[in-house]
Amino acid sequence: MSVQTKITFLGTGTSQGVPIIGCDCKVCKSADPRDKRLRSSVLVETEGKTFIIDTGPDFRQQMLRSEVNDITAVLFTHEHKDHVAGLDDIRPFNFKYNKHIEVYAEERVQKSLKREFAYIFAENKYPGIPQINMRLIENKEFFIEGVRIIPIRAYHHKLPIFGFRINDCVYLTDVKTVPEKEKVKLAGLKLLILTCLRKEEHISHMNLEEALAYIQEVKPRQTYLTHLSHRFGLHAEEENKLPAGVKIGYDGLHLTV
């Protein structure tokens, strides 16, 4: 029997979000709430556990909007600001439950976090700072309170990053290429959440053509595109052009797999 997994799209936008400050394009001016995109992140709930993948600059707003009352752990894909900048806002969970938050990241990302949030890791800690336990991950499966997590190595231009498989769901954002040997980790997927920046070529993100080609290779049951820029187009217009089994993610979308 497969385990039920609930996915909430906390944010589906790029590093600048949508709308972009000062932009007058039709997407940035759209009244459709599906075109309002915070920085990319997802909430995964399964087996009574709650996982956050990435804590971008909008993390506080995302937690309030989705009424998240507790988290089991945070998983980081990579160290770019639009994926880590909100880490300080885990403090309410520290205060409410009098506990440290478990944070999982590979060695390079941990080093970056220790630079960016030096006060969290200082020897003489300031009162009230975030309380976290750093957990090292490598490109092999691990478990968090009994839940199996499978990292998937991918590349954001030349930067190695991680996607994650939890049960039959995979989250892959900020991806340009995925090594062939990693494909076995995407077998039998019910849900793939995949980066798709725009239609034009980009140096460090899949565009629409590349994303659709990868979906054809992996053959998940359902795919939702994420990390979309304003140059992708209006949600209402573009989703109708996609092939069967492929949809556009939007902030606040809930899925149960």
Image (spheres, helix red, strand yellow):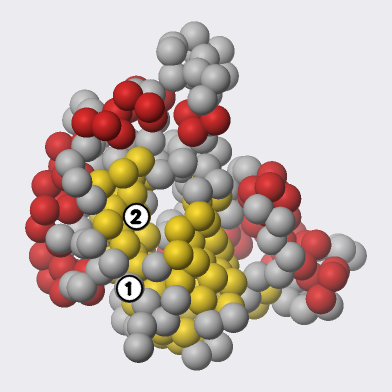
Query: Considering only order in the chain, which callout, 2 or 1, is on the residue closer to the N terminus?
Result: 1
Nearer to me, 87 or 3: 3
Residue 53 rendering spot, x and y as whole percentages: 50, 61
Q: Residue at x 38, y 29 (%)?
A: 235
Q: Residues within 10 Å of mark 2 (few under 14, many from 20)?
A: many
Proximity of marks 1 and 2: CB atoms separated by less than 8 Å? no
Q: Secondary structure at mark 2?
A: strand
**Quarter of the N terminus within the rendering:** bottom left
x and y percentages locating residue 252 in the rendered image: 55, 46
Circle 2 is placed at which residue position? 193
Tell me the kind of residue under disc 2.
Ile
Horizontal arrangement in the rendering, residue 168 relative to residue 133 (left or right):
left
217 over 142 or under it: above or below: above
Front one among 220 and 14: 220
Residue at (34, 55) in percent of width and height: 193
Residue depicted at 49% across the width and 33% down the height: 34
Q: Which residue position is annotated with label 1?
A: 168
